[in-house]
Amino acid sequence: MKTIIEPFRIKTVEPIRMTTRAEREELLQAAGLNLFKLRSEDVLIDLLTDSGTSAMSAAQWSALMRGDESYAGAPSFYRFESAVRTQFGFKHVIPTHQGRAAEHLLFSLIAGPGDVIPSNTHFDTTRGNIEAVGAEAVDLPIAEARVPALEHPFKGNMDLASLKTLMAARSDDVPVVMMTLTNNAGGGQPASLENLRAVAAIARAHDTPLFIDGCRFAENAWFVKEREPAQQDRSVSDIVRDMFALADGMTMSAKKDAFANIGGWLALNDDALHERARARLILTEGFPTYGGLAGRDLEAIAQGLQEIVDEDYLRYRARTNAYIVERLDAMGVPVVKPPGGHAVFVDARAFLPHVPPLSYPGHALACALYEVGGIRSCEIGTVMFGRKPDGSEVPAAMDLVRLAMPRRVYTQSHADYVVEVFEEVKTMRESIGGLRITHEPEALRHFTATFERL
Ligand SMILES: *Cc1c(COP(=O)(O)O)cnc(C)c1O
């Protein structure tokens, strides 16, 4: 059959509250033109993020009841630890309340002023945590990754020549090499196993550890299976094990590819670093067998990790985004190609060429999508990345709008609706103007800044 159906049935539903365009215009104005400040009940299709928004399975809800809330040594922890170890093979597993807490633990222990940490592309919280300890976060994506319309099977790859140059010049200042799988900020694009092997070899040649930001490891492994010739007959789980066998550790947000609503972990092999991380964990997150989570959360993650590598799920997951990208592309809306694993990315700089980057075309488009159709999306561009640590403001590499797909939440008619909203927005695009920021916090400004129209 040609139709790839949702490989699940719906047992519990959440109503969507309908709103009018006039209501939404008022609500957005009251929110300072920042979509993060809207109430979720005022949103029709919430594609702000795929983080923590997954629908849990019946098996996960059952596992919650088994959650043991003992302060120390709960069986829920051991089930969680075993699920992470089985999938990824690391010796030590430290639960954290979400991914950024794992990042904070890692970077606060191994990095400081004068250090530089390369990645294919750091995500915003990763970059934020690196900069917060005074180190420098450097993105080294392949050149193809910066051209939204260009088709390439592995736009999440690291540029190996740039990594070699950096390591040759400054390896003493590089405490860790990072790879983000998939590359969220770069369009949800995967890295190949071949590229990961080459990155690991360069890091190893300089005795530098390699850590994977593994938030979307299953989607990355699915694309490896689909697109990397040598991997097509292998199971996703085997590919996952191969990917992580190349690394010395990982940071993880269980709110992504573990189907959980909260949680994360830091996993690693180094005994001494584990000791130090555990001590810091007790200070900031909690005892090492719960790390800021409830026992029931650990159970939901352990079960979710088994479900996320299901290949029927991953085939449907990839198809959801491909379907929307194909239809937007056919309509002439500039999209990042090929489709990413967790989201559809629209090239707002190309869609609104009359809005200069420092007037935030991505944010302007995101506001229009909400007003016209009640869709909440997220700018990944100059609002998110334009403010530099020295206070200057420069255009980001790209101005994208991300429509992130919550896992197992929306159906095909929701996708058709999203496409229809774009048809409407396209007819009025010349009338969409830029914005300016009226208030911004010191760091991660996109979450709380307020805007006004120019
Ligand atoms: C979400 C995300 C993080 C941070 O995880 P949180 O659970 O949101 O703290 C880090 N890296 C990437 C690639 C992510 O997508």
Image (tube, rainbow, N blue to C red):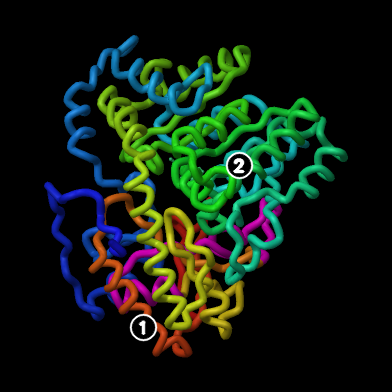
**326, 334: nearer the viewer:** 326
Q: Which residues are magenta?
A: 365-394
Q: Secondary structure at mark 2?
A: helix
Which quarter of the rendering shows the N terminus?
bottom left
Q: Is residue 417 left or right of residue 16?
A: right
Q: Is residue 424 above or below residue 262?
A: below
Q: Is residue 263 above or below residue 334?
A: above
Q: Secondary structure at mark 1?
A: helix
Residue occupied by mark 2: 193
Q: Which mark is residue 423?
A: 1
**Image x and y of residue 436, in percent:** 53, 73
Residue at image location 34% in from the left, 37% down from the top: 262
Q: Is residue 29 visible?
A: no
Residue at image location 45% in from the left, 38% down from the top: 235
**Image x and y of residue 371, in percent:** 32, 76
Report the amino acid beneath label 2: Leu
Q: Is residue 354 visible?
A: yes
* Residue 393 forms part of the magenta stretch: yes
